Image (spheres, rainbow, N blue to C red):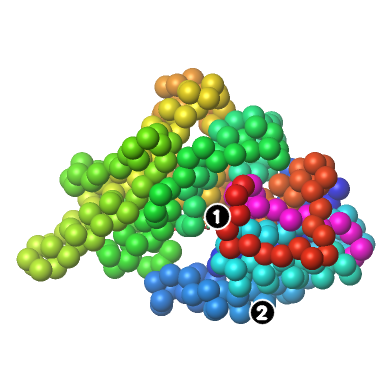
Amino acid sequence: MKILAFESSCDETAVAIVEDGRTVLTDQIFSQADLHAIYGGVVPEIAARSHVEVISILTERALADAKLTREDIDAVAVTYAPGLIGAVLVGVNFAKAAALALDVPLIPVHHIRGHIAANYIAYPELEPPFLCLSISGGNTLLVDVRSYTDMSIIGATRDDAAGECFDKTARVLGLPYPGGKPIDELSQGGNDTAYTFPVAHVSGSPYDFSFSGLKTAVINIAHHAEQTGEVINKADLAASFTKAVSDSLVPRTMMAAAELGYRKIAVAGGVAANSRIRRDFIQAAEEAGCELFVPPLKLCGDNAAMIGSQGYYEYLAGTRGSSDLNAFATKDI
Ligand code: KG4
């Protein structure tokens, strides 16, 4: 079954064609990062307008790249939540029109379910149940994935998402947006014990996260240095900051896996591209005797292949988007 999939929830417009949930026939991505870089973050209206401009072009390109025609498409899948509402609306409306024109089923896909499904593409042998940590620019979630379509959130950030914290820290250090990759690069060779940062625990909620204290601590160091003329070793600061994020994410995930009895752990989302976090997860999983699944870098960030993959399993479970399908800025998984 070939699914034409759309993703437009933030600042990537993406169109993919995925066969039977696991085989990516084409994966077209247009990143708007350059458009937003001068503002230091995503500007929702610019994002929505850019999606409108490129979504048709990417669709034509996807069909051509996969050497398929419109008649070969069996269903259309689309991210319908969560995300920047104007941005998600572009994908939803385009997908509805595509499904109507092609006379095929429409399948709404939750964006985080899509991130989790990136692992199905990367690891053909992976099947639920497992525990997944989804870490992106907008979300930090620990998800109990009981089946392909039955899952629940057992932990979440109480304030900033992990990626947001990377982006804000990068801004303070004068690095470009999005800041995750530049911080990752800068921290190579930095001393991760040069600065001591708080690793927040949310009382009574052992699986929840909090990153606002860490963000404030970095801002305070930068402002203090500015005022006193002290020169910050940015590599040390980046490495120490990344260690604090990892120390918040990895042990908590391992603890949740042990308590829920999972021996399979997956990681997903843009921040899963971070080299330190990947390394720490590999080590922790090895020590705990757990299998670890982390998608290759290309599948960590927003893409439509993951939406096509999850769309397939939603289709098998009977999920269909009706003709009044709407977009949602927030939605439980
Ligand atoms: O999943 P994603 O592409 O978009 C959302 O759904 O939010 O994640 C984007 C986030 C950004 O905050 C970006 O700075 C972060 O992922 N990111 C990284 C790295 N690469 C991207 N964070 C840390 N280390 C990286 N190497």
Query: Which residue of the protein is positioned furthest toward the left in this rendering?
Result: 228
In this view of the protein, can residue 48 be seen by the observer?
A: yes
Residue kind at label 2, given as amino acid type: Glu
Q: Provide residue 120's location: percent of width, then percent of height.
A: 67, 40
The image quadrant of residue 225 is: bottom left
Q: What numbered label is drawn on residue 71? A: none
Q: Report which quarter residue 278 is drawn in.
A: top left
Give coordinates of residue 72: x percent, y percent. 90, 58
Residue at 75% in and 50% down: 311
Q: Residue at x 71, y 40 (%)?
A: 149
Q: Looking at the rendering, which quadrant does residue 77 occupy? A: bottom right
Q: Is residue 166 left or right of residue 231?
A: right
Residue type at the position of mark 1: Gly
- Rate crowding at label 2 as few (under 14), some (14 to 19) or many (20 or more) other CA atoms within 10 Å: few
Pointer 2 or 1: first along the chain: 2
> Does the closest atom of ligand 1 sit within 8 Å of the Cβ of label 2?
no
Task: Mark yes or no: residue 28 visible.
Answer: no
**Mark 1 CB in 8 Å range of ligand 1?**
yes
Q: Give the structural element (helix, strand or loop) at label 1.
A: loop
The boundaries of the magenta stretch are 102-115
Q: Which mark is residue 53?
A: 2
Residue under label 1: 301
Q: Is residue 206 above or below residue 12?
A: above
